Amino acid sequence: MAKRKRLGLAGFTLAELLISLAILGVIATFTIPKILSAQQNAADSAKAKEAMATISAAYQAYQQDNTVTASTTSASLIPYLNYVARDTSGYLDDIPNNSTYNCNSVICLKLHNGSMLAMRTSENFNGTGSNNGWWFLLDPDGAPSNRASIAFVLYYNGRISTAGKCGGFVTSNINSYTCDPVYDPSWFSL
């Protein structure tokens, strides 16, 4: 041991190593869940942005092939949407009241990224004004999980936004909502 100290090679004691490991364990206990949560939020936000782009592109494609009127329904977009399967027996999360939608009462489309997009078949614009729009609901994990979904509004003029950022009042033949930031889940960022 004296020879090692002369060469400057003194090591750590077992107690020092254990204390260092305990400190690292405490730090990991606090940081790992936050890192995992941030990764999940980023993944869900990316799925939502992708769904918004898919809806917008489908509407543009529909407009090229058809004339959009006040009575055009959201179900008209189905042939133009890029989806994997249609689900008629599942459930997905609803916002902001932590309930679930039954895929028997709405159209649920499983997207290629694992998320689920829901829309009502009979919802039409009910007008051609700037506040007439269709509502869509996206559940990023595609199943009830207590992870909030996000609602989108596609307006007659082609603009799309989240329900929290739509800036005003939206109406269709089924829904009439006042836009509110409470509708956007905490994991979404634009």
Image (cartoon, rainbow, N blue to C red):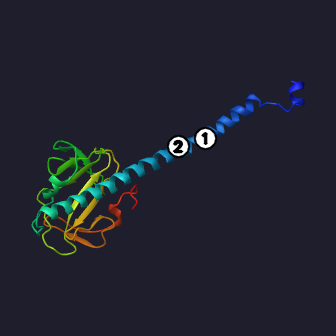
Residue 118 location (% of width, % of height): 21, 52
User: Is 85 or 148 nearer to us in this picture?
Assistant: 85
Residue at far front of view: 64
Image quadrant where one finds the N terminus: top right
Using a 10 Å C-alpha cutoff, classify the residue at mark 2 as few (fewer than 14 neighbours), some (14 to 19) or many (20 or more). Answer: few
For mark 2, give the secondary structure: helix
Where does label 1 land, which residue?
26
Residue 178 location (% of width, % of height): 26, 70
In the drawing, what numbered circle is on residue 32? 2
Of the two numbered discs 2 and 1 on the same chain, state the one appearing first in sequence.
1
Based on the displayed image, in which of its 4 quarters is residue 133 positioned? bottom left
Q: Is residue 69 left or right of residue 54?
A: left
The residue lying at 32 percent from left, 61 percent from top is: 183
Using a 10 Å C-alpha cutoff, classify the residue at mark 1 as few (fewer than 14 neighbours), some (14 to 19) or many (20 or more). Answer: few
User: Is 167 or 190 nearer to us in this picture?
Assistant: 190
Is 33 drawn above or below residue 95 in the view shown?
Answer: above
Amino acid at circle 2: Ile
In the drawing, what numbered circle is on residue 101? none
Residue 77 location (% of width, % of height): 16, 57
- The residues bearing labels 2 and 1 have C-alpha atoms spaced at a distance of 10 Å
Foreground tag (2 vs 1): 2
For mark 1, give the secondary structure: helix
Amino acid at circle 1: Val
